Image (cartoon, rainbow, N blue to C red):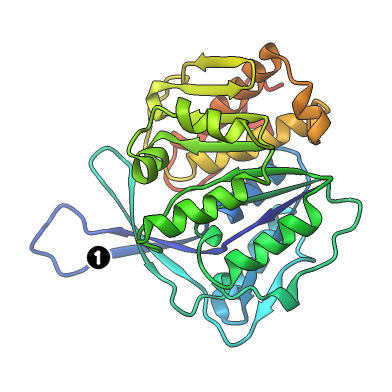
Amino acid sequence: MFLICGEALFDVFAHAGDDDSAAAIDFRAVAGGSPFNVAFGLSRLGGQSALLTGISSDFLGERLIKVLEREGVDCQYLVRESDCKTTIAMVALDPNGSPQYSFYHEKGADRALAFSSLPELDDSIKAIHVGSYSLVVSPTSETLGTLIEREGKNRLVTLDPNVRLKIEKDKDRWRERLAFFASHADIIKVSDEDLESLYDSGEGSDKAQEWLAGRTQLVIVTRGVNGVSAFTRSGRIDLPTEPVEAVDTVGAGDTFQAALLCWLDEHNGASQEGVAALTDDDIRHMVTFANRAAGVTCTRQGPDLPYRRELADGE
């Protein structure tokens, strides 16, 4: 089982229509948050996942739990935060279908995870995934850091920064916390947009080599329609993205991450030793599978991640 750590919230999609003079805006609320999406996306692909996050006792928090249960995600590591609210992310799409976010989160349950709430992990947890703004908001950031230090030594650890500067504007804070989590991660998946926003270059080679000099064994840089680059200690592999008729890209990165974890689990790669043993061909097959899954998500509105049966020629 994979323990996915980080935020759970509601994405509220805003649509003002074509009449700029109209005052009304239509809204549609969808359960989300990057780690939340990875957890249920992995379950939809046939993997086993559990989510560790703070969950409010309000109506929206109860709804998040119902969604997780319906999707088959293990809820035993959820921490109820009765004095906090559920984070809301307002989402509007730009002309290219890319999401633009505004967050309402100051008293969000997902950013209130405390040291005292950390669980002891049983042997069923073979890997830990961390990512997105939970890496930088206190006390959740420090709490997850303690978890990784304590429980990640002999488990696979994966990381997806999924930078959200609307949540935390201080780039130095992002760089400092990302450096910490990267030093404990076996696999780092990062977008060229995240690299550009923090390090002023989306190419990724230099940063990948820096991370690979430590514990990290594989760095995957996603570049949207421009493909994917995978960096190992022995070289670089570039792969194209499969073309699709995209509706929007919401949830595509989370789908890619969930598919990576699924592929690793099914090919004896969900361990530090398993990642070390990956061949170049293994990496090509894994990235191709993840690209195919992310492509399905791009063909529909919002974070509607695919089921395994929807992936033609699935591995």
Q: Which residue is pictured at 38% across the width and 55% down the height?
A: 171
Q: Which residue is pictured at 34% across the width and 64% down the height?
A: 27
Q: Is residue 23 visible?
A: yes
Mark 1, residue position: 25
Work out whether 43 lies above or below 227.
below
In the depicted view, which residue is nearer to us: 272 or 34? 272
Element type at mark 1 = loop
Q: Amino acid at mark 1?
A: Ile
The residue furthest bottom is 83
Classify residue 59 by image quadrant.
bottom right
The quarter of the picture where the C terminus appears is top right
The residue furthest left is 21
In the depicted view, which residue is nearer to us: 137 or 37? 137
Residue 51 placed where, x, y %?
A: 70, 59
Classify residue 139 by image quadrant.
bottom right
Residue 249 placed where, x, y %?
A: 41, 39
Classify residue 20 by image quadrant.
bottom left
Q: Say few, some or many: other residues with alpha carbon within 10 Å of mark 1 (under 14 / 14 to 19 / 20 or more).
A: few
Q: Which residue is pictured at 75% across the width and 28% down the height?
A: 275
The residue furthest right is 123
Residue 258 placed where, x, y %?
A: 64, 40
Residue 5 placed where, x, y %?
A: 66, 57
Number of numbered markers: 1
Q: Which residue is pictured at 65% across the width and 33% down the height?
A: 260
Q: Is residue 307 visible?
A: no
